Amino acid sequence: MIEIRELGRYVGEAVDLGGWVETKRGHGKVAFVVLRDGTGSVQCVLVKKQVDPATWDAFESLTQESVVLVTGEVRADERAPGGFEIGVSSLKVAGLAAEYPIQPKEHGVDFLLDHRHLWLRSSLQRAGLMVRAEVEQAVHDFFYGRGFVRIDTPILTGAIGEHAGTLFETDYFGERAFLAQTGQLYVEAACPAFRKVYCFGPTFRAEKSKTRRHLTEFWMVEPEVAFADSDDNMRLQEDFVSYLVERALENCREELALLERDTSRLEHVRPPFPRISYTDAIGRLKAVGSEIEWGSDLGAADEQILTESYDLPLFVYNYPKQAKAFYMKENPDDPRTVLCDDLLAPEGYGEIIGGSQREDDLDRLRERIREEELPEAAYSWYLDLRRYGTFPHSGFGLGVERTVAWITGRRHIRELIPFPRLMNRLFP
Ligand code: NSS
């Protein structure tokens, strides 16, 4: 059996194909079946006089999404999508499908999410997930190419990585355990062993908000670099994000076209990205009438206003200490703030990265853990990293679904993960 993507190599020859029926139509003498095999789709043509009765009967019994095995000749045909069609000599039904719930008409999104296990087969969903797969491969290629070592970090943890408010808690043989909100604390520990490291895996947040950019399970890439300061960190982020966009443009042309993505908006994504300090951002927001006060984190609406005037992603750096996590390094030039950045994607997509230089001073870090009322005992190993050879280091986390939503131009990040986990959704 061959794959549809290879048809070009077999023009004029007989081949065997297997796949799922997307559509069928017939006029009594000639019939057409569009077959999808996961690598592409092709139209198969049956002429009643030229096939045996069993093949014709098999065609007549076909329902949408039935699995068929087809033998036929590959013909080049400019009019056909993909450039080829199959002149069928034999067709067998390998798995007759019951009436398929997803029809070529508008379905409500709840219905589609209830049928996510089937919805995956639809062309727009396949295109979005193909871009995701390309971006994920590009993540590994980028870091491998720069000599980073991949570190797999635990999903079951005892220490709170980000905020106490969004923890999934579970019983761990009588002890409290959490699903990891981040792998950061562990990649920090791996820095003295490997200098430049990254982790890439699922992370969990019990987000009680139902927005288009929050999932309870999402995938995050987290590099961590020894001897890098906040500036180095932002430079790595702009190189990284530009590379991901470039790879999608290079290898996902067809998918982006199918998704009707205006790729001219992505073509010029390359370093340097514009930067604005948090304090200046607040000034700019107030100037346009926002009621935001210095000290609060930026909301989606604030991010939208700030990014409107840029084509490129925008760095907002050095947020107030009280708006950010305990591990960020105090800014020596303005101790009310920390050395950090958020990277905001244009076109209304907003934050795709959160990053920072880490607090490397033992006493100050311990102080921050106390201020945040975090359980100090759970961080004793993390504090060891400041006891035994502390060093300046920085890192960041990029959310894969938000990044792919921006690259593909899809509105909701739930479409860019195969099986989204949302507050009200644990199935399929
Ligand atoms: O909370 S973050 O801003 N930062 C961290 O977790 C750091 N520990 C990363 C690090 O420095 N190693 O999250 C990082 C990114 C954020 O910018 C989003 O793109 C994404 O993770 N993110 C999410 N995506 C989808 N759904 C939810 N709920 C979500 N939360 C964060």
Image: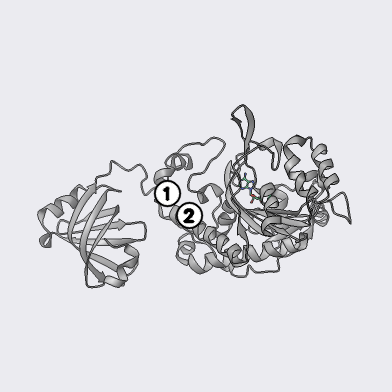
Which residue type carries mark 2? Leu
Residue 77 in sight: no
* Left or right placement of residue 211 versus residue 277 in this view: left
Q: Position of residue 147 (x, y in %)?
A: 62, 65
Rendered position, 145 above or below 397: below
Q: Nearer the viewer, residue 10 or 201?
A: 201
For residue 120, the mark is: 1
Q: Secondary structure at mark 1?
A: loop
Answer yes or no: do the residues labelled 1 and 2 have beta carbons within 8 Å? yes
Q: How many marks?
A: 2
Task: Please give the residue where the numbered disc 2 appears in the rendered image.
Answer: 129
Rendered position, 388 above or below 314: above
Residue 400 in sight: yes
Which residue type carries mark 1? Leu
Q: Quadrant of the N terminus?
A: bottom left
In the rendered structure, which disc, 1 or 2, sits on the residue that comes first in sequence?
A: 1
Q: Residue at x 68, y 56 (%)?
A: 193
* Left or right placement of residue 265 versus residue 52 in this view: right
For residue 36, the mark is: none
Q: Quadrant of the C terminus?
A: top left
Displayed quadrant of residue 98 = top left
Q: Secondary structure at mark 2?
A: helix
Q: Residue at x 84, y 51 (%)?
A: 330
Q: Position of residue 227 (x, y in %)?
A: 76, 61
Q: Residues within 10 Å of mark 2 (few under 14, many from 20)?
A: many
Q: Position of residue 304 (x, y in %)?
A: 69, 53
Q: CA distance from mark 1 to mark 2?
A: 9 Å
Q: Is mark 2 within 8 Å of ligand 1?
A: no
Q: Residues within 10 Å of mark 1 (few under 14, many from 20)?
A: some
Displayed quadrant of residue 346 = bottom right
Q: Position of residue 13 (x, y in %)?
A: 22, 70
